[in-house]
Image (cartoon, helix red, strand yellow):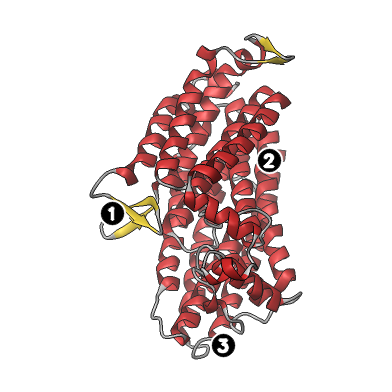
Amino acid sequence: MATVHEVTARAGRLSEASLLVIAVGITVGARAFVDANAGSGIDQSLAVYTAAVAALAIGAHVLVRMRAPAADPVLLPAAFALTGLGLAMIRRVDFAYAARGRDTDFGTTQTMWAVVGVVAAMAVVGLVRDHRLLRRYTYTAGVLGLLALMLPLVPGIGREVNGARIWITVAGRSLQPGEFAKILFVIFFAGYLVSNRDTLALAGPKVLGVRLPRPRDLGPLLVVWAAALLVQIAQRDLGASLLFFGLFVAMLYVATQRVSWVLAGVGLFAVGAVVAGTVFSHVGSRYEAWLHALDPSVYDSGRSYQLVQGLFGMASGGLFGTGLGEGSPGLVPYAESDFVVASLGEELGLTGLMAILALYLVVVQRALRAAIGVRDGFGKLIAVGLGFSMALQLFVVVGGVTRVIPLTGLTTPFLAYGGSSMIANWIMVAFLLRISDVARSSDLDAPAGAPAAEART
């Protein structure tokens, strides 16, 4: 007779398979609309694309069914649907650029990176049999994260694009190590905080009614965090600095349950924003473009041109959009990367954009649900860190494009052009699948070789 756990696992995988059918339909349908409306029409390449997407989805589903049978059934389909929409939109931008005399092949390149991302995620699901084993590598993850951030500063390897030095060249391809550093820092913060949360929350002096941790307890965290921020400032990548800072404060709050950390973080961020706007000219320029985007002098100088063009595009899309392949995304600089949200807003309208944001909300909600369900503190912090980093990154990107906050150089997870971002975000999904498998499983015993203390933390 099947156990309750086995029945629940089978039901979850059946739901996942059904949702994957819908996700594949969205992926193929979006490309079909783009080819029909903006390309030369639907041809046999769509059949090849459909077969490849279906094969990839089936392979991922089978592997998750074998290696993580109790994993959350919604994460994989949601990630597939977002990736498929991004691939279709990037292909659409290629056609728009071609109409303006610019020959690009972003769509094909991004499709390759998407395949690599899914394969990398499935490799993580297959090889990392228990996330708790990663706690052994807490400090290793911290060191590797810092090294990854510093690589773009190494002469001969690093490459500067649009004033930011955040890329390296490997085998003729550009790579953004900071995307992977984000995951490494989540592991480091989680491992350190779960081992020292009691001393961070309870030990130390009180100042103005707020209990502060002892320097020796918070020291390693501050060293890694400060070094990461300094490196990002040196690279002129303040968007990533904001992401790492928010991640640090959020995980510290979850570990200690002290609101004072959030208040202190907001205060430090406000001071840092004022200082950055004063000291760094490119930051001040972005502030001016944000506050005075429609001022003729600011627009004519080019400082707010990209932002305003994106706003015009979304405005022309209205409630239901112009239709996939029937807008003018080529009028917006970097429509395939920084402003892919504006491109989607133009052709899918406010309704389509809200549906996409709802998909992100589902992914973040499932990450937090896994954090609540898993019993070990290390897994809780990893799930919270990964979910919060995606939510914060999305807020910063969408907020910048819609002029809620100043623009930054962050990418939109799964949607924007960029191999590093695609692979890193799929690896994040893999970790969430693994943690949710433990959270939803009734068998919480650690596998052979896992320390008992870590399994029951």
Q: Quadrant of the C terminus?
A: top right
Secondary-structure class at tag 3: helix
Residue 222 visible, this angle: yes
Specify the label residue 170 is tagged with: 1
From this view, report whether residue 49 is shown above or below residue 416.
below
Residue that numbered label 3 is attached to: 36
Inspect the image, locate mark 1, and give the three-letter code of the amino acid beneath it.
Val
How many neighbours does mark 3 have within 10 angstroms: few (below 14), some (14-19), or many (20 or more)?
A: some
Secondary-structure class at tag 2: helix
Q: Position of residue 427 (x, y in %)?
A: 49, 48
Q: Position of residue 81 (x, y in %)?
A: 60, 64
Q: CA distance from mark 2 to mark 1?
A: 35 Å
Q: Residue furthest bottom?
A: 40
Which residue occupies 65% across, 53% down?
405
How many neighbours does mark 1 have within 10 angstroms: few (below 14), some (14-19), or many (20 or more)?
A: few
Q: CA distance from mark 3 to mark 1?
A: 36 Å
Camera-near label (3 vs 1) is 1
Inspect the image, locate mark 2, and give the three-letter code of the amino acid beneath it.
Leu
Q: Position of residue 203 (x, y in %)?
A: 63, 9
Residue that numbered label 2 is attached to: 368
Of marks 3 and 2, which one's residue comes earlier in the chain?
3
From this view, report whether residue 118 is shown above or below residue 37.
above
Camera-near label (2 vs 1) is 1
Q: CA distance from mark 3 to mark 2?
A: 39 Å
Which residue occupies 48% across, 50% down?
281
